[in-house]
Image: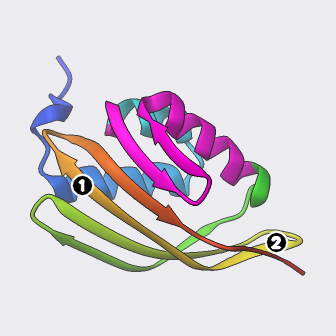
Amino acid sequence: MGEDLRLRPPAEVFDDHLRLAGEHRFDEDIERNVSPDAVILERRGVFHGRDGARHLARLLGEELPGAPYVYTNRLVEGRFAFLEWTSEAEHTRVRDGADSFVIEDGWIVAQTIHYTVEEY
């Protein structure tokens, strides 16, 4: 039998999320790490659950097609995590990415996402 993903500590969930997202394996990341009841706050509004996470992943993919993510700061304290990141695609970039997370029972249960897409 496989591992029980719900027993993972928050730091392990956070690392798994960053690894899979960094590899653009968004569907696998969402299934493994995002709660079906997650709440995500992002500049475009409030998004719910895995469908909300998938929608935001699609938008990010359109804004930064195929671009690598550079994680410049990662912090974890108990059930809370914080990430700063940058990314650069062919004609767009993000220099101010900042996400925060609440991780409980092996799931990301809440997340805030902030970034500004610059065209150049």
Dot 2 amino acid type: Thr
Residue for point 15% across, 28% down: 4
Residue for point 17% across, 16% down: 1
Residue for point 78% across, 50% down: 62
First-in-chain label (1 vs 2): 2
Q: Position of residue 117 (x, y in %)?
A: 73, 71
Can residue 65 be seen here? The reply is no
The Cα–Cα distance between marks 1 and 2, rounded to whole angstroms, is 29 Å
Can residue 51 be seen here? The reply is yes
Numbered tag placed on residue 102 in the rendering: 1
Name, please, the residue furthest toward the top: 1
Q: Residues within 10 Å of mark 1 (few under 14, many from 20)?
A: many
43 horizontally vs 28: left or right: right
Q: Position of residue 84 (x, y in %)?
A: 45, 77
Residue at the disc numbered 2: 92
Secondary-structure class at tag 1: strand
In magenta segment, residue 50: yes
Dot 1 amino acid type: Val
Query: Which of 5/100 is in front?
Result: 100
- In the image, is residue 39 above or below residue 97? above
Residue for point 40% across, 29% down: 31
